[in-house]
Image: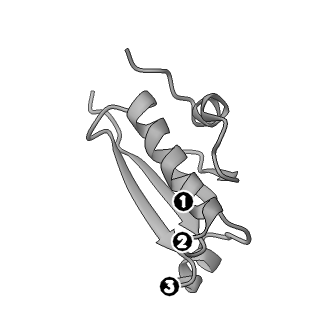
Amino acid sequence: MTKRLLTLRLYVAGDGPNSRQAVGNLNAICRRWLEPGGYQLEIVDILDEPLRALDDGVLVTPTLIVDGTAPVSIVGTLSDHSAVAQALGLERRG
């Protein structure tokens, strides 16, 4: 059975504190809970690509969209790593 690639898309607004915090937290979550090469991460700045945010129904930032059989959307800086991992159905590596 082939493992499915998890697609993560984080919408941010510029390079402000909340955007930087969300990016850092998401990178930490990926390192801790996901296998290298088992996910695709995309950071979308809505200041550069506002129509993409509208297409995905993103009204506030930061927002993490996870594509899968049942798409998941998480709003905020992703500070509670365990809660984010649980919402994504992930188990800690190692």
Q: Amino acid at mark 2?
A: Asp
CB contact under 8 Å: marks 1 and 2: yes
Instruction: State yes or no: discs 3 and 2 in contact (Cβ < 8 Å).
Output: no
Task: Name which residue type carries label 1.
Answer: Arg
Q: Residue furthest top?
A: 94
Q: Label 3: few (<14), some or many (≥20) within 10 Å?
A: few
Q: Which residue is mark 3?
A: 48
- Disc on res. 15: 2
Q: Residue at position x 40%, y 20% from top?
A: 93
To which quarter of the image does residue 46 belong? Answer: bottom right
Image height check: is 72 above or below 11? above
Q: Residue 20 bears which disc, if any?
A: 1
The CA span between labels 3 and 1 is 16 Å
Tell me, what colour scheme is on the image?
Answer: one colour
Q: Quadrant of the C terminus?
A: top left
Residue that protrudes farthest toward the right in the picture:
59
Say whether residue 39 is left or right of residue 84. left
Nearest-to-viewer mark from 3 and 1? 1
Q: Secondary structure at mark 2?
A: loop
Q: Is residue 68 visible?
A: no
Q: Which mark is residue 2?
A: none
N-term-proximal mark, 1 vs 2: 2
Point out residue 60 in the picture as x, y percentages from the top left corner: 73, 68
Q: Is residue 24 visible?
A: yes
Task: Out of 26 and 5, give the one closest to the viewer.
Answer: 26
Is 1 placed left or right of 31 in the picture? left
Q: CA distance from mark 3 to mark 2?
A: 12 Å
Q: Secondary structure at mark 3?
A: loop
Residue that lies at the very extreme toward the front in this rendered image: 17
Residue located 60% across and 69% down the image: 16
